[in-house]
Every structure is written in structure tokens, then in C-alpha cells.
Amino acid sequence: MPDLPALNPVVHGRLRLALLSLLSGVEEAEFTWLRAKTEATDGNLGAQLLKLEEAGYVAVEKKFVLRKPQTLYRITETGRQALTEYVQALKQLLGPAMDA
Amino acid sequence: MQDHTTEQELKDRLSLIESMIAEGRRNTESWGWTFVLWGAVYYLAIAWSAWGHSVWAWPVTMLIAVIVTIGVASLKAGNHPETTLGRAIGSIWIALGISMFLLFLALGLSGRLTDQHLFVAVISAMLGMANGASALILRWKVQFACAVVWWVAAVTTCLGTDAQSMIVFLAAIFLCQIVFGIYGAIAEAQERKPRGPIHA
């Protein structure tokens, strides 16, 4: 029996996984859009995004638009790779149960 | 980690990934209203040019529609992320808007906007092209049906009488702008149904 793959703990967190998945489909997204899509609280969302940023999975850009602060997030190549590997590991772990 | 993770949790993660990727790729902007707006503007322009006999009817109404569309879209776009798909679709409609504005402004001012059949054929073919391109990118059968209606209108207006040409044009506007716009707005509202919060 082949060794079962380990799931990346940074990606595995439910909110972090949702954030990486959301960001994989867009070029970049504002904090407010991510909050609306996940319905997470500001504090929780900020903390999870910081973990993803520290892991190098998301890049952050802060700028001012019409004098209002805007924080933009985008998935990095490392983050995209981590998400792909996580999905592969997940499918391998589920195996035949995928069809059930 | 997986020792403590149940099969159901793993399946839940997989379904979360699928739903979030779909959520991110979904065109989160609301465009149904623009079809209705432009449909109403076409009717206004037709009525103005028919009863007012003004060369300014089409250029002025097109300009107003462009300004309103850009204004409302920029207000609504503030909280939406940019996607390649969204930019591709947006580019088609922006290019169509600019083409129609410049063409009908030049035709109107030069006094050459006199052949109703040619006018309806050109505007229908342009709308067929934009709807067709958008439908093929989005793989949206309903919008492709609209493109077919516009192409049929473009061809039949060349072959029919003045009255037939106008009836086909008015019917195409109603189906492909008003009805399709309302359908699009309803579909967009259904896509925005609230979902439960995602916790860490």
C-alpha cells in the first residue's frame, strides 16, 4: 500500500482554504470582497490572510483610491502550487470514497 | 493530520474548494440592467428619429446610454475583483459601444443615416457579433440564442419591406434586450443567494 500524503496544514484551515480557492479564480481581490464571500469577521479574516502571506501563498498590495485605503490580495505561484498539491493529496486520501 | 480527519471532512474540503473557485470565477458584476437600459434607449432613439426626424436622435441617446452605463458600472465595480473573463466580456461591449457611437454620430451628422434597412442590418449585425462573442466565451446558450435573433434580424431586414424591417428590429430589441436583460438580472440575483459564514 503506498504512503498516504500529508495535508499541508497552512492550506488545510477551512477559511484559509476558502481564501486560496477564491483567489485562484481572480487576478486580485479586495479585503472587503473576500469578507463578503466568506462572511468571516474582520479579525479572523485578517489573521488567516496574514498566515497565508507569511507562508508566501498570497501577496498583499496596499494603496489609496480616492483617498480611501484599499488592500488587494492575490495568490502567488507558490500559493497556487500549494493549492494544487493539496487537492491532489485530498483526492489521493479519499480514493474510492470520491465517487461515494 | 489525516488520522484525525474524517472522510466527511475531506469531502467537505473538496466541495469547499470547488464552490469557492466557482464563486471567484463567477461574473460577480450585474449586467442584466444594462441590456434593459440599452433596449429602452433603442426604443427612445427609434421614436425620436421617427417622429422628431432629428439627426441627433441616435448620437445623443447613444452618448447618454454610454455615460449612464459607465457611471453606474464604475460605482458598482468598486468591490469586485478583476478577472480575465470579466475583462474579455467587458472589452467586447466597450468596443461595441464606441463603434456604435462613432458610426451613428458620423452617419447622423453627414445625413447618410437615411436607409432604414441598411441601418437596422448594421446595428443588428453588430449586436449579433457582440452577443455571439460573449456567448461563446461564457458558453451561454441563452445569449447565443439572442445572437441568432440579431443575425436573423440583420438578414431579414435586407429582404423585407420597411414595415417588416421595423417590426423585426423592434421584436429583436424586445427579446434580446428587455426580456434577456430581465432574465439575466433574475439569474444574477439567484447567484447572489446568501451562504453561511466560513470559519477558520
Image (spheres, coloured by chain):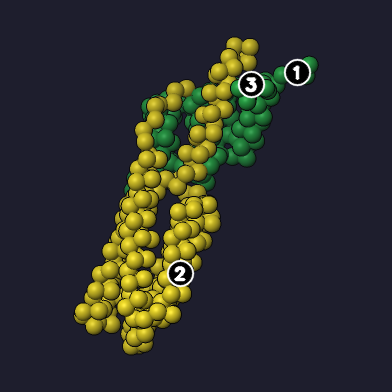
Q: Are marks 1 and 3 on the same chain?
A: yes
| Residue at 40%, 26% in the rendered image | B197
Chain letter belonging to callout 3 = A
| Residue at 47%, 49% in the rendered image | B82
Q: Image check: B139 left or right of B36?
A: right
Residue B57 x %, y %: 27, 77
> Residue B152 bears which disc, if any?
2
Disc 3 designates what residue?
A97
Disc 1 designates what residue?
A3
Confirm whether residue B2 shows in the render.
yes
Q: Hey, what amino acid is under mark 3?
A: Ala
Chain letter belonging to callout 2 = B
Secondary structure state at the residue bearing disc 1: loop
Going from N to C along the chain, the mark reached first, 1 or 3, is: 1
Q: Is residue B57 above or below residue A34?
A: below
Residue furthest to the left = B52
Residue furthest to the bottom = B111
Q: Image check: B179 left or right of B145?
A: left
| Residue at 43%, 41% in the rendered image | A30
Look at chain A in the picture and name its colour.
Answer: green
| Residue at 43%, 67% in the rendered image | B150
Chain letter belonging to callout 1 = A
Q: How many marks?
A: 3
Q: Hey, what amino acid is under mark 2?
A: Val
Q: Nearer the viewer, mark 1 or mark 3?
A: 3
Q: Are marks 2 and 1 on the same chain?
A: no
Q: What letter labels the chain drawn in yellow?
A: B
